[in-house]
Amino acid sequence: MVASSAGDAAFFVTGTGIQLHGGVGITEEYDIQLYFKRARALESYLGRPDESRETIAQLLLDEPAPEGTPRAA
């Protein structure tokens, strides 16, 4: 649950920051581009937030996982 929230928050904050800076937010002049890169790395490390939510919902509802999806023990 925390991974899902952290990923969403990181993308929301960095996306908003880049919009506030305009096109200059992507250049190396501002630190916001570093935070955006870190948010992308966080997503690749933790997995996509929607996948995390789906796994949590399956575990809470005790539904069988789709074929080919690893299930937590």
Image (tube, rainbow, N blue to C red):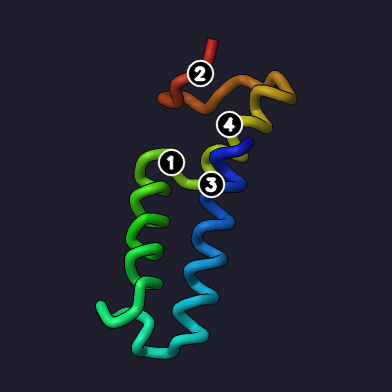
Identify the residue under disc 3: 49
Q: Secondary structure under badge 2? A: loop
3D distance between C-alphas at marks 4 and 2: 8 Å
Q: Secondary structure under badge 1? A: loop
Residue located at (52% from left, 50% from top) = 7
Q: Relative to 20, is 1 on the left or the right?
A: right
**Residue type, label 1:** Gly
- Which mark is drawn over residue 55? 4
Identify the residue under disc 1: 47
Residue located at (57% from left, 43% from top) = 4
Q: Foreground: 28 or 6?
A: 28
Question: x and y percent of residue 23 in the render?
Answer: 36, 89
3D distance between C-alphas at marks 3 and 1: 6 Å
Neighbor class of circle 3 (other Cα within 10 Å; few <14, some 14-19, many 20+) is: some
Question: x and y percent of residue 40 in the render?
Answer: 37, 56
Examine the rendered structure and indicate whether residue 12 appears above or below residue 54: below
Numbered disc in front, either 1 or 2: 1
Q: CB atoms at circles 3 and 1 under 8 Å apart?
A: yes
3D distance between C-alphas at marks 3 and 4: 10 Å
> Which tag, 1 or 2, sits closer to the chain's start?
1
